[in-house]
Every structure is written in C-alpha cells, then in structure tokens.
C-alpha cells in the first residue's frame, strides 16, 4: 500500500468528460463520482483510470444508471467516506464517517464540520453560470485526511 492514497472526486459531469478532468484524476487509486453522470459512457471513460464508487444524481436515469445507489459508504485507507449527490440528503448522524462527498450545487467546497470533512468537488461538466469547472483530490496519509479543489479551465 502506498504511503499516501489519492482519491479523485468528481461530480456533475452531465455527459461531459473533459481531458483536463482525466489529467487531474490520473494516478488516483480510486475515483468517487457524486452524481449527475447522465450517460454510462462517462463512467466507462473514468473507469479506465481507477476503480470507482458512484452514486446517482437528480438528473440520472436510464440504462446502467438506474441501478446506481442514491448514497453509499466506502472504506479506503482507513477512512470512511459517505457519498451522496445532494448535501440536503446527508444524514444527521455521521458517527464513524470521516468524509462526506456531495455534488449537486456545482459549487466547490472543502470544509470541516466537527470531526467530518465535507467536500464538494464542484462541477467538472458544462460550466453553469459563472461557477468554476473543477474536480477534487482527497489525500489520506498516516491517518490524516486532506482535500483540495483542482480548477480545470479558466
């Protein structure tokens, strides 16, 4: 196991997988997609980079997408990560959860709330209003968990 584990965080691709997003996520041990995928081809493209955990967003339906969970919890590198598309659907009781990953708002966020790190990687798909186009990177190393937002285009 590497000393540091890098997890790529992506959301709200809305059928668009930018080359900049692929470059930013290259080398990650795992990728988390927090929903609004729209078409399975997005997942096929990302799956070529690393194993994935994916949840369904409010714009997701259709073949292979309907079977995705609305939320999930994964354990990686000693951290427990809860993934859901909309922050409004995060449960109140986050006992045992280290990181919450959401999407939906298209607004990137890295914020600690109590002992839990909340991360919204923003939108990696089509630009919405004047919001940035971004992904997130989560690093887990020796029990420390950090996240940062990576801008993809100007």
Image (cartoon, rainbow, N blue to C red):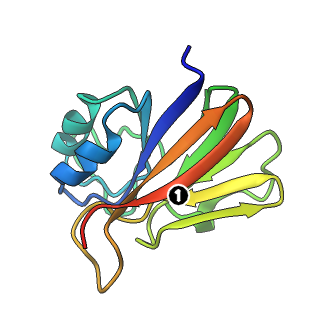
Q: Is residue 71 above or below residue 49?
A: below
Q: Residue at x 27, y 51 (%)?
A: 21
Q: Is residue 105 visible?
A: yes
The percent position of residue 138, horizontal first and vertical second, equals: 54, 44
- Tell me where residue 88 sits by quadrant: bottom right
Q: Is residue 89 above or below residue 72?
A: below
Q: Secondary structure at mark 1?
A: loop
The percent position of residue 26, horizontal first and vertical second, equals: 30, 36
Q: Residue at x 82, y 52 (%)?
A: 115
Q: Disc 1 marks which residue?
A: 102
Left or right: 138 as drawn, with respect to 43: right
Q: Is residue 72 visible?
A: no
The percent position of residue 61, horizontal first and vertical second, equals: 28, 52
Q: Residue at x 28, y 79 (%)?
A: 128
Q: Quadrant of the C terminus?
A: bottom left
Q: Residue furthest bottom?
A: 129
């Amino acid at each position: 196991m590497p000393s540091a584990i890098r997890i790529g965080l992506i959301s709200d691709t809305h059928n668009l997988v930018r080359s900049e997003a692929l470059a930013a996520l290259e080398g990650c041990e795992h990728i988390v997609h927090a929903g609004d995928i729209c078409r399975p081809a997005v997942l096929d493209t990302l799956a070529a980079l690393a194993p994935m955990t994916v949840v369904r967003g409010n714009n997701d339906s259709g073949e292979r997408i309907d079977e995705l969970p609305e939320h999930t919890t994964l354990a990686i590198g000693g951290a427990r990560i809860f993934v859901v598309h909309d922050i409004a659907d995060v449960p109140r009781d986050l006992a045992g959860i280290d990181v919450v990953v959401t999407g939906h708002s298209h607004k990137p966020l890295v914020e600690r709330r109590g002992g839990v790190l909340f991360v919204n990687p923003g939108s990696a798909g089509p630009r919405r209003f004047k919001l940035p186009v971004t992904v997130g990177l989560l690093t887990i190393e020796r029990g420390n968990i950090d996240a940062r937002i990576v801008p993809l285009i100007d």
